[in-house]
Image (spheres, helix red, strand yellow):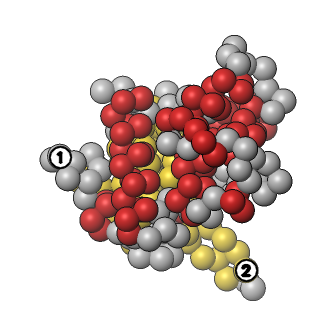
Amino acid sequence: MKTLIECRQIEKRFKGDGIETYALRNVNLTLNEGEFVSIIGPSGSGKSTLLSIVGTLDTPSAGEMLYEKQPISQMNNKKLADFRFENIGFIFQQFHLIPTLTALENIMAPLFGRKVSYDKKQRAEQLLDLVGLKDKSNSLPSQLSGGQQQRVAIARALVHEPKWLLADEPTGNLDTDTGEIIFQLILSLNKEKGCGVLFVTHDPSLAERANRKVEMRDGEIISDTLVIQHA
């Protein structure tokens, strides 16, 4: 199995009022191609901070992150932005849709200002169909339910066919039934599209349905275990 992402002794520190706080301590993590990895732990355990560093939205205070054995720290801002565009799709708990854009336009948003080899509108329409919202292409976010908005957000994350989907509590703002629909959608994308998934959750039942379960506490990884099969 090909290793795509490697975190080596990652630390993240914050300073405030003269006090230094560790969000991450000595985190070592290897992510392999096509894996579905869950990250679970209590609030404040460092899950979202780790996700931000893996997704290059934030930088570590110490340690190194490598992608296909190349240090991310050596990239300038433009190369880093290109790296994210080519490799990473983000799904957040809060959806982060642009309220003045339609569902179709929100999916196309990451492509604005980018030269790509495919038809942008056609790709967005295909993804809208994939997430079951073909009839909502002209709807604004305010006209969609929470579950529908999250499906648009997933389609947006997939628009440039990233190698990894980074999902930060994507079911956290949804009821149980809608959350299950969203989880099943992400699971099917992992199986059918082959994109890796890093799935942050508070829900133990969802965490157990990944290929691997990483448990965090107080900024450290306390266990990293293989899960035999999906539920």
- For mark 1, give the secondary structure: loop
| Observer-nearest of 105 and 59 | 105
148 vs 162: above or below:
below
Query: Which residue is labeled 2 in the image?
Result: 16
Mark carried by residue 181: none
| Observer-nearest of 95 and 218 | 95
Query: Which residue is labeled 1 in the image?
Result: 229
The N terminus lies in quadrant: top left
Answer with left or right where residue 19 lies relative to residue 231: right
Mark 2 closeness class: few <14, some 14–19, many ≥20 residues within 10 Å: few
Residue in the picture at 36% in, 39% down: 188
Toward which corner of the image does residue 79 lie, by quadrant? top right
Depth check, mark 2 against mark 1: the one in front is 1
Residue in the picture at 36% in, 59% down: 180
Give residue 52's position: percent from left, percent from top.
59, 54
Q: Can residue 13 be seen in the rendering of this structure?
A: yes
